[in-house]
Image: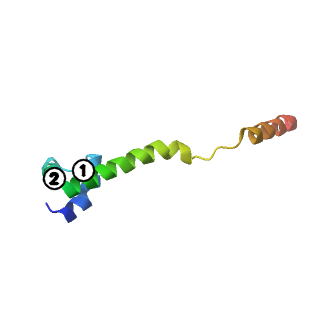
Amino acid sequence: MNCESLTRRITEHQEGTLSPGDCAEVERHLSECPHCGRFRDELLALARLCRQAKGDLIPRMPDDLRTRIARLLDAGA
């Protein structure tokens, strides 16, 4: 396996969808190639940041606006 083929297969490796033989090839290349090892580590860090930020990306209505809307809905009911 070379660096180019690893970059095409790294996502499948991380998701666990490679065959055992392909997985072993990717792992062997990662253990021998510092550049690709750093690439994998950066992808893992990026995925971790995305998971952490997911909650921050959901817009939240300000509490005072939420309260005013709830009052208007209650008044109309």
For the image, the number of numbered tags is 2
Q: What residue is drawn where x is 50% and y is 45%?
A: 54
Against 5, residue 58 (above or below) is above
**Front residue (pair 57, 21):** 57
Left or right: residue 48 versus residue 64 is left
Residue 27 placement (x, y as % from top left): 16, 49
The answer to which quarter of the image holds residue 29 is bottom left
Rendered-image quadrant of the C terminus: top right
Please, what is the three-letter code of the amino acid marked with disc 1? His
Left or right: residue 62 versus residue 36 is right
Please, what is the three-letter code of the amino acid marked with disc 2? Asp
The secondary structure type at the circle numbered 2 is helix
Classed neighbour count for the residue bearing mark 1: other residues with Cα under 10 Å, few (<14), some (14–19), many (≥20): some
- Marks 2 and 1 in Cβ contact (< 8 Å): yes
The earlier-in-sequence mark between 2 and 1 is 1
Classed neighbour count for the residue bearing mark 2: other residues with Cα under 10 Å, few (<14), some (14–19), many (≥20): some
Residue 4 placement (x, y as % from top left): 21, 65
The secondary structure type at the circle numbered 1 is helix
Residue 22: image tag: 2
The residues tagged by marks 2 and 1 sit, at their Cα atoms, a distance apart of 8 Å
Left or right: residue 28 versus residue 18 is left
| Residue of label 1 | 13
